[in-house]
Image: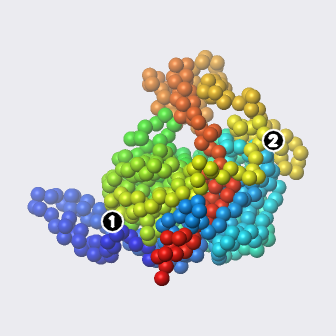
Amino acid sequence: MVMLSQHYRSPMQISLRLHHDCVTPPLSISRNQIMKRYKNILTYILLLTANTAGASAEDDMTSSWTGFRNGGTSRLSGSLPLQWSPNDGISWQIETDGYGQSAPVISDDRVFVASVIGEQKDQCALTAFTLKDGQRLWQHRFDAAHQAPSSYMMARSAPTPVVDGNAVYAFFESGDLIAVSPQGRQLWHRDLTADYGAFQNNHGLGSSPAQTTDMVLLNIEHKGPSFLLAVCKRTGETLWKTERPSGSSWTTPIVIGDEASQQVVVSSGGNLASYDIKEGGQLWQLDGLEGNSVPSPCVVGEFIFTGARIPEFGSASEAAKSNLCVRVTGDASEPYELCWRADKAVSDYASPVVDGEQVYFLNKVGVLYCVDAKSGETIYQQRLRAECWATPIVTQDGIYFFAKDGTTRIVKRGREFEVLASNQLWDPMNAPAPEHYREAKGSGHGHGGPGAVAKQAGRGEAAPEAKTESAEDAPSSRGGRTAGMLARLMNGDRNKDGILQADELSADFQPMLKRVDTNGDGALDQVELQAMAESFATRREGSQASARDPIVYGVAAVDGAVVVRTGTRLYCIARNNSSADKESSP
């Protein structure tokens, strides 16, 4: 069972201790204050009970990691190796075909990864490897429904598959959704853009599917008509489809509750919304969030912990308010309860994780916030020196943070900060470059998703809005980036007065208006627009160099082994493969 803290106490022990320490009030405390304390105690007991129940349920899942963040908890019922290096402790590594920004999944001692292949992402692939030695078992490859340049500016097989005992279900930013048997046989295939229209997004889609026993759930959020979709696992048919606000999102839905009362929850676009799992009707919505379109929420029992990054032109103090905890009550009259908002903690690419009594948030520059799970108060704030795009994994022995540069920091669980170990996957002075993968020629700064397609596969016709900048035309300099952004913004200036009113801004930029409208007149003049573009360009300096492989994108783990995925390579670190493990073995 997963340890809830260094000194675990049962919920009843917690209740008795809190009753003795906190509830017996002096006469000066009012009845309302007493009731508030009882409510806080109940919330704490529910949270710890949820952690206990969740750990018990996962004890039977030590041999599988079934989706992105293992369904939303990123928690392992077991342990992982504590030490490894490029020359010691790595069980196997292998170059993969094409490129992939998704995480692996593991089931029945097999590792499954999704990739896109070709300079124009011509093909999609799903590949199976043995967990023990990395032997390739099979690969299912097919022509992508749509093509687009394979470059650092674009999603490249970003959605992580989900797996169960019957199939692996993979979604690609091309619109392809496929189910493949454990033996590599295609069960069904769909092109969602053929059914619901082209995806309109500057950088493609990155949201991963979620799953229940009988359905796959997808949040298709882009500049065009957006929706939450439930698909039958057995047939691939649509079970229901619910409209969602248009926008740009990389977050993944989570499923919460038991089978009798399941809900699917999406954190994105400024709100946290829940939908009925059976028919897709919206149950409740919490508004007023910012920066919640990249990190995904973490679920522990009936508690949801949302992550949010600092929004464009926003502040850390404002962003912290969107890193919060909500309890799903199951009461139709009051379906959720806002438990707390963080005062300092913010997230970025990595989603928050929960370890019993603590929640952990990691920001863009590698500062780790440990927050009290019942109150939201900051316990500590420490520089981890690890910029992570992958979400950490909580294990019995510690919390594993996988930095994009191949460094892994293992942090002690609990209220005191301590780095237990720091390990390296490769030599930083000799990082392994991709052996076979090549980016699209002349599209280093290309934009576009399947809606900005170079060619529709199998049809030989150019997409109407297809446009790819050449390397010479790309705005590679700071001035070019600034001018390019201003030009795109001014396309909305319908009356050509050089001032952008709120209704002339695109949906992506409208939330930023209040943060860049320095004179408070509800519009953006040329001075404000220029300052906005300069800030935008400054924040993106060096982005091209920092987005080149090798980059750790995602991880999957089972008891004793963790598989790490870069854009073009898989690494497996397994127990008893390092000299330290062998020395400690009986």
* Tally of marks: 2
- Kindly state the secondary structure of the residue where label 2 is placed: loop
Element under disc 1: helix
Disc 2 residue type (three-letter): Ala
Q: Position of residue 287 (x, y in %)?
A: 46, 47
Mark linked to residue 44:
1
| Picture layout, residue 157 above or below residue 501 | below
**Nearest the camera: 6 or 576?**
576
Q: Confirm whether residue 300 shows in the render.
A: no
Q: Is residue 64 above or below residue 378?
A: below
When the figure is inspected, residue 228 is found, relative to residue 257, above or below; the finding is above
Residue 382: x and y, percent?
38, 50
> Which residue does the image show at 58% across and 75% down from the upper left?
63
81 left or right of 21 in image: right
Q: Quadrant of the N terminus?
A: bottom left
Q: As drawn, which residue projects farthest toward the top? A: 497
Q: Residues within 10 Å of mark 2 (few under 14, many from 20)?
A: many
Q: Amino acid at mark 1?
A: Tyr
Residue designated by label 2:
454
Direction left: furthest residue: 27
